[in-house]
Image: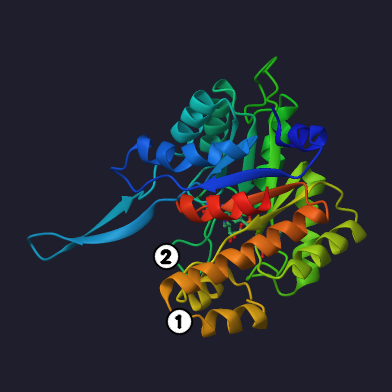
């Protein structure tokens, strides 16, 4: 079933999770062990992130360096299929532009369609660590909107080969990313919003937000989206903070701000347990307010921390 249909049919705020594939060499069992206790809250869909290859330089015996392309967390599509098979819920693979030509994107989408995976979160992806800006693959997409357009065309039975006759239309429900505190590369919020609208106009069916820790940022974001004519569901992405180091790590990585009250509460917490408790309570308060004010779904970035998410959900639901 499509994410949008789940939302349309829901009587209350839904719950969903985002999981990361394990590091290469990991087991599917680890994902199941993490998800098993969380299934009690009946998520209608679960997202699985996608991780681009990174370039690394390995020193050989001769002293020369060898350039190698490695993928640390492969397996997104396999994990999606396993989740659907084991739990009977929908899986939403993330698909990025980075590292894919348009042809490879088309092939990946055909695989998903054949597996019965009809939901995809369409993203650009970040720059590789060794590069200072996002560089598309030669013959690949530069922005997420281009990926949305390709998916939308496939939904109309239009594939890359113009001579393909009677091609089966795909049925993708397309999600895209939105940034209540602006994407870090955008020159200003309004420009970013304009590009978000382009993604929706191109065919995106719903938006999932970057994490935020001040609900007002989400409510203002929704208002601004509605004001420019973005009318699709906007799913808030939520992450509990459990370590003090995240107070600097998260803003550095995700370009978001922590509210002063939260920073103060974290700073006064003494033990590891106290710090975790502050993060959990903050996340509970955020979740309760978002639910009360009618957010369509609470989408938790689990980062493999089942216990924390369980504590939060047991309080919220
Ligand atoms: P875009 O929508 O393409 O936007 C990127 C930047 O370009 C923005 O600054 C935008 O304002 C600007 N822009 C957009 N269109 C145009 C245009 N036509 N002309 C000029 N400028 C334009 N990354 C992963 O690698 N794997 C994942 O699984 C993953 N999951 C994510 C899930 C969520 C919910 C979110 C919020 C992010 C996720 N990311 C993931 C990170 C994401 O790939 C990065 O934030 C990336 O830098 C931007 O992706 P985007 O799809 O928002 O890009």
Assign a secondary structure to mark 2. loop
Please state, as top left, top right, bottom left or bottom right, where the N terminus lies in the image. Answer: top right
Q: Nearer the viewer, residue 178 or 215?
A: 215
The colour scheme applied to this rendered structure is rainbow
Left or right: 202, with 164 as reference point: right
Identify the mark at residue 129; answer none if there is no mark: 2
The number of numbered badges drawn on the structure is 2
Closer to the observer: label 1 or label 2?
1
Q: Nearer the viewer, residue 300 or 103?
A: 300
In the rendered image of this protein, does residue 92 appear above or below residue 235? above
Assign a secondary structure to mark 1. loop
Of all residues shown, which one is farthest toward the left?
61
Could you tell me which residue is drawn at 49 percent across and 73 percent down? 275
Query: Residue 102 occupies which quadrant of the picture?
Result: top right
Q: Residues within 10 Å of mark 2 (few under 14, many from 20)?
A: few
Q: Residues within 10 Å of mark 1 (few under 14, many from 20)?
A: few
First of labels 1, 2 by sequence position: 2
Does residue 75 appear in the picture of this structure?
Answer: no
Q: Position of residue 265 (x, y in %)?
A: 59, 80
Q: Position of residue 92 (x, y in %)?
A: 59, 38
Could you tell me which residue is drawn at 45 percent across and 50 percent down? 51
Identify the mark at residue 301; answer none if there is no mark: none
Q: Which residue in the protein does label 1 denote?
A: 270
Q: Nearer the viewer, residue 85 or 137?
A: 85
In the rendered image of this protein, does residue 84 appear above or below residue 151? above
Q: Position of residue 150 (x, y in %)?
A: 67, 38
Residue at mark 1 to residue at mark 2: CA–CA distance: 35 Å
Does residue 131 appear in the picture of this structure?
Answer: yes
Q: State which image quarter holds ligand 1.
A: bottom right
Q: Position of residue 229 (x, y in %)?
A: 90, 54
Q: Nearer the viewer, residue 316 or 35?
A: 316
């Amino acid at each position: 079933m499509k994410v949008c249909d789940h939302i349309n049919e829901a009587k209350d705020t839904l719950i969903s999770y985002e999981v990361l594939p394990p590091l290469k060499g990991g087991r599917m069992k680890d994902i199941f062990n993490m998800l098993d206790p969380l299934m009690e809250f009946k998520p209608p869909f679960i997202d699985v992130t996608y991780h681009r290859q990174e370039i690394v330089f390995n020193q050989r015996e001769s002293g020369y360096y060898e350039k190698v392309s490695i993928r640390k967390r492969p397996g997104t599509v396999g994990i999606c299929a396993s989740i659907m098979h084991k739990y009977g819920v929908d899986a939403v693979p993330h698909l990025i532009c980075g590292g894919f030509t348009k042809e490879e994107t088309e092939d990946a989408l055909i695989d998903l369609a054949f597996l019965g995976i009809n939901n995809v979160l369409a993203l650009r992806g970040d720059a590789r660590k060794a590069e200072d800006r996002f560089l598309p693959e030669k013959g690949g997409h530069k922005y997420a909107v281009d990926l949305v357009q390709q998916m939308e065309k496939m939904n109309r039975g239009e594939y890359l080969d113009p001579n393909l006759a009677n091609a089966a239309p795909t049925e993708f429900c397309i999600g895209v990313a939105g940034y209540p505190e602006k994407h870090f590369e955008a020159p200003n919020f309004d420009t970013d919003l304009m590009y978000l609208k382009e993604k929706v106009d191109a065919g995106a069916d719903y938006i999932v937000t970057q994490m935020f820790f001040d609900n007002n940022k989400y409510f203002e974001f929704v208002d601004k989206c509605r004001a420019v004519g973005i009318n699709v569901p906007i799913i808030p992405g939520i992450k509990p903070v459990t370590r003090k180091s995240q107070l600097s790590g998260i803003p550095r990585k995700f370009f978001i701000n922590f509210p002063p009250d939260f920073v103060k509460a974290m700073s006064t917490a003494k033990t590891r347990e106290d710090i975790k408790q502050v993060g959990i309570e903050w996340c509970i308060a955020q979740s309760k307010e978002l639910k009360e004010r009618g957010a369509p779904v609470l989408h938790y970035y689990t980062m493999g921390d089942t216990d924390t998410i369980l504590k939060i959900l047991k309080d919220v639901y």
